[in-house]
Image: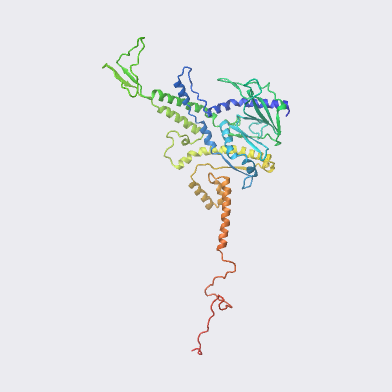
Amino acid sequence: MNGDELSKVVQWLLAGRRAESGRLTEIHAHLKNKVCDIYVPKSATVEYRRLVDQARFNILPLLVSSLAQGLFVDGYRPANQLDNATVWDAVWQPNRMDARQSGIYRAALQYGLSYATVLPGEPAPAITPFSPRRMTALYADPVNDEWPEYAVSVGLPRPVITSDAPTQMLTTITVYDDTHSYAADVPSVFLLPQTSEDRGDPLPFEGLAIDYSTVVVKEHGLGVCPVVRFLESYDDLDDGPQGVVYPMLPAQRQLNQTTFGLLMAQQQQAFRQRWVTGMAIPEDADGNPVEPWNAAVNRVWHAESPDTKFGDFEPTSLDGYLNSRDKTLLYISAARQIPPHTMVVGNAVSNISAEALAALEAGHQLDIGEHKTAFGESVEQLLRLAGKAMGDEDTWEDTSAQVVWRDTTPRSLAQVADALGKLAQLLDVPPRALWEKIPGVTETDISRWEQMAGDRDAIGDVAALLAAPPPGADEPVVPGAEVDDAEPGSGGADPVLPGPGPEGR
């Protein structure tokens, strides 16, 4: 792209980024526990404001973790192959994706989508994960296209040291197309919308121009825009996925409001309030009433008049607030298919069998399975692109390769061992083919087991060889067998002597 084309593409990309920034910023603020949504009057006391601050009952991170902890890619098998593809050891492992893949899934679960770029590099192509708050991609058909037309990644703002204005900031953005990447500096104000208390006021982009002489252009030569999109799900073909957090924001606000009412009741009304009748309240010199007692746990109230009566009000019950919060948690549990015992909802789950617990987990496992399908396609696309970046055309053209997900289903080891043993005995499934079905077993474990099994077979062969008779050893004598040409002292049968005759008598 030349300078004019790059400026237009940057304007389009930043406009798309600005359009989705409101929703992404709101989700991020709720996840970081920065939003409470409790009304605070201007005349509120410090005590009131502290109760508002304590009313954050944030369960949104749990919605993300309950799914993300069940997602872990443990291998990548080409079509009709038992071992991992070359790209797995050549690109995935050097980029530390065993650990970094979790960030991609969590960002997609939080915001509905996330991204990763693959660019040629030494000694291996580089994989870089991005949150949608730092990358925006434009597709000709956002639903059906595999690769975007253009994408932009946004760096962190930095001050301009040579500027007279101390607040002038620049941000490096990188634009990607199907042949090159373009890194340029733009004013940070174009990337951070001007906001007030209740609305955002984006700046126009008509004045944004890129000084092409300062742009760093690099050729990647992949033939496609090197950005892979991870979609949380494919359930909405009109507007795209929203993630698991955004639909639950109203329920989160309700939880905060209920928790605030609970804290207010605890602070002001949960303890018995006392009353007194039949006495005159003294007044000071100005005619203002004077409190007759200083209430404390180590003080006793008394009055001189026999007509004075003391009493107290019933405390406010907290059960209504606690039940209301539990019902909201149960709704979230049902809506997101999270087992109630994961959210510790009151006494919803107690004294149940292992089969009942497995039934409660069934919906959650189905949800994890759906996300494995959605994310698995993106991981396969990512590794195909990594194969192309390293010059492996076979990997790039192999659209039948499959990722291997680690089995994170909560089951007892005894139950799994019993099931796998029956598969091997009753259905004649090779035992080594069942190793990868053991929960928590990694590809490294299986490779080590294969080597150990091979060593054990070799040792068994040596032991059998040592137990066999040496070559040329005599065969054991069978009683009653005839031996021909046996010589005395030769180790064969003794010769038969003739019986006594008349001469020998």
Q: Residue furthest bottom?
A: 503
* Image coordinates for residue 255, horizontal then vertical, percent: 47, 27
Taking the spot 56% from the left edge, 62% from the top edge, the residue there is 466
Q: Residue at x 52, y 49 (%)?
A: 420
Asked whether, in this view, residue 2 is left or right of residue 333, the answer is: right
Is residue 61 at least partly visible in the picture?
Answer: yes
Q: Position of residue 107 (x, y in %)?
A: 58, 33
Residue 222 lies in quadrant: top right
Asked which quadrant contains residue 267, the reply is: top left
User: Would you say 314 lies left or right of 15 here?
Assistant: left
**Quick check: 193 above or below 350?**
above
Quarter holding residue 481: bottom right
263 left or right of 375 in image: left
Q: Is residue 423 left or right of residue 302?
A: right
Q: How is the image coloured?
A: rainbow
- Residue positioned most to the left: 306
Work out which residue is located at the far top of the displayed protein and give it: 286
Residue 279: x, y in percent? 30, 15
Question: Can residue 400 be seen in the rendering of this structure?
Answer: no
**266 shown above or below 493:** above
Q: Nearer the viewer, residue 342 or 310?
A: 310
**Which residue is nearer to you in this view: 179 or 248?**
179
Quadrant position of the N terminus in the picture: top right
